[in-house]
Image: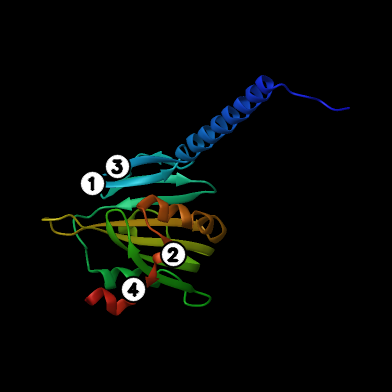
């Protein structure tokens, strides 16, 4: 059986199809926009995934903190400066993991605020247990911690430093690596290797 359309019927059908495509496209764009939300951590503007739950900072040194899926903790620290120097911080973060089985990757790049250094450690983490002053830890195997130093660079102003820590199981944190870069406006394709000697330049 064949169907024949008059020119008017054909035009109506074509118009309906076009409207359907446009509406679907608008819906897709809207959904993409809803995937992140803008959150201010002092002067730092972050694009946070919509499924991250913002929680109340537990200390004055925390500019913001979030709970990501699968018990991943995300904290944005602000101390009012580099605090101890970049190299010293990097060495301390790596030292929080047991050497046996440790995997470390260090990269750097540009982000919305200026520049960043990302230290990715995977293995058995000596996870802090209790208040910082107690200096107690528990061994947490199969863990992953992303430590990010965001250097805020504004014309006519001194550099400012933010420290981001994303921690949890290696499986869960690994799935958030892309979101962490999205959060600070970084492009993983443009990242370069970071070496400790780079911090002294």
Q: Are marks 3 and 4 in contact (CB under 8 Å)?
A: no
Question: In what element is the residue under mark 3?
Answer: strand
Badge 3 or badge 4: first in the primary sequence: 3
Question: In what element is the residue under mark 1?
Answer: loop
- Residue behind mark 2: 189
Badge 2 or badge 1: first in the primary sequence: 1
Residue found at x 46% / y 52%: 179
Q: Residues within 10 Å of mark 3 (few under 14, many from 20)?
A: few
Badge 2 or badge 3: first in the primary sequence: 3
Image check: 34 left or right of 149?
A: right
Labels 2, 4: front one: 2
- Rounded to the nearest angstrom, the CA distance separating label 2 from label 1 is 26 Å
Q: Residues within 10 Å of mark 4 (few under 14, many from 20)?
A: few
Q: Are marks 2 and 3 in contact (CB under 8 Å)?
A: no
Image check: 129 left or right of 173?
A: left
Image check: 79 left or right of 57?
A: left
Q: Nearer the viewer, residue 123 or 199?
A: 199
Q: Residues within 10 Å of mark 1 (few under 14, many from 20)?
A: few
- Residue behind mark 3: 40
- Residue behind mark 4: 91
Labels 2, 3: front one: 2
Labels 3, 4: front one: 3
Q: Are marks 1 and 3 in contact (CB under 8 Å)?
A: yes
Which quadrant of the figure contains the N terminus?
top right
Looking at the image, residue 143 lies above or below residue 24: below
């Amino acid at each position: 059986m064949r169907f024949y359309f008059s020119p008017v019927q054909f035009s109506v059908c074509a118009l309906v199809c076009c409207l359907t495509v446009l509406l679907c496209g608008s819906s897709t764009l809207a959904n993409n926009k809803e995937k992140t939300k803008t959150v201010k951590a002092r002067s730092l503007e972050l694009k946070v995934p919509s499924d991250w739950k913002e929680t109340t900072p537990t200390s004055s040194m925390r500019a913001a903190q979030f709970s990501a899926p699968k018990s991943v903790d995300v904290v944005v620290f602000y101390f009012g400066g580099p605090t101890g120097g970049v190299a010293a911080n990097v060495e301390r973060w790596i030292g929080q993991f047991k050497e046996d089985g440790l995997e470390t990757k260090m990269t750097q790049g540009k982000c919305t605020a200026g520049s960043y250094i990302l230290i990715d450690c995977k293995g058995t983490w000596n996870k802090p247990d209790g208040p910082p002053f107690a200096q107690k830890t528990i061994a947490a195997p199969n863990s992953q911690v992303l430590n990010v130093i965001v250097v805020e660079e504004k014309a006519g102003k001194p550099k400012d430093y933010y420290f981001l820590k994303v921690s949890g199981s290696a499986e869960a944190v690994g799935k958030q690596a892309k979101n962490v870069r999205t959060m600070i406006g970084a492009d993983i394709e443009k990242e370069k290797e970071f070496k400790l000697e780079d911090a002294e330049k």
